[in-house]
Image: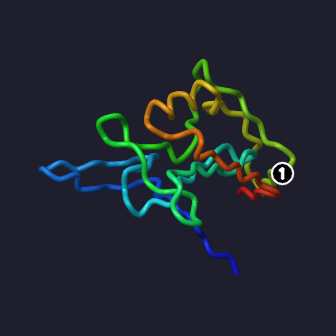
Amino acid sequence: MAIPTSETLEHDIADMGDGRVAVYNLCADTTRKNANGFVCNMHPSEGVWLFRGAPRGSCYGSMYGDHRTCGVIPTCAPRVARRQSILVKDSECIVRLRSAPERAPYVCFDERWFRNMEAMQWNRDHTCVELVPIVVGLP
């Protein structure tokens, strides 16, 4: 039996107080107290990356940052053609039933991207864990 130890909502809404409401689409609030690391879906060939927060017990970390700086983290690699994008194609771990192989631009999480995350108060010492897929089944 598999039991998840961390989960991240891709779409959420929160009461910020003072009559303000925050809507999170494809990102997660890093300041919430119930956070246990943040899961980010990459291209199916890359799997899932787990961004750890501040150390707390034996879990993947806790909250960090604040809303004056940023306070959010993406929950998936954006599919956008930009300078920092890479053209990704299916790897051997992808098994497709009926759909055609994908060849799409995904934003590359490179050094520049990680420096931007640091500016948003994510501490690089907390690390990012890459959960690489063995087999990915797609329709």
83 to 62, vertically: above or below: above
Q: Position of residue 16 (x, y in %)?
A: 22, 51
Image quadrant where residue 95 sits: bottom right
Relative placement, left or right, of 95 versus 42 is right
Relative placement, left or right, of 111 versus 133 is left
**What SS does tag 1 mark?**
loop
Image quadrant where residue 15 sits: bottom left
Residue underneath mark 1: 93
Which amino acid type corresponds to the residue marked 1 in the rendered image? Cys
As drawn, the residue found furthest toward the bottom would be: 1
90 to 2, vertically: above or below: above
The residue closer to the viewer here, 4 or 24, is: 4
Relative placement, left or right, of 28 versus 126 is left
Residue at the spot 59% in from the left edge and 68% down from the top edge: 5
Type of colouring: rainbow
Residue at the spot 22% in from the left edge and 50% down from the top edge: 21
From the image, which quarter does the C terminus lie in? bottom right
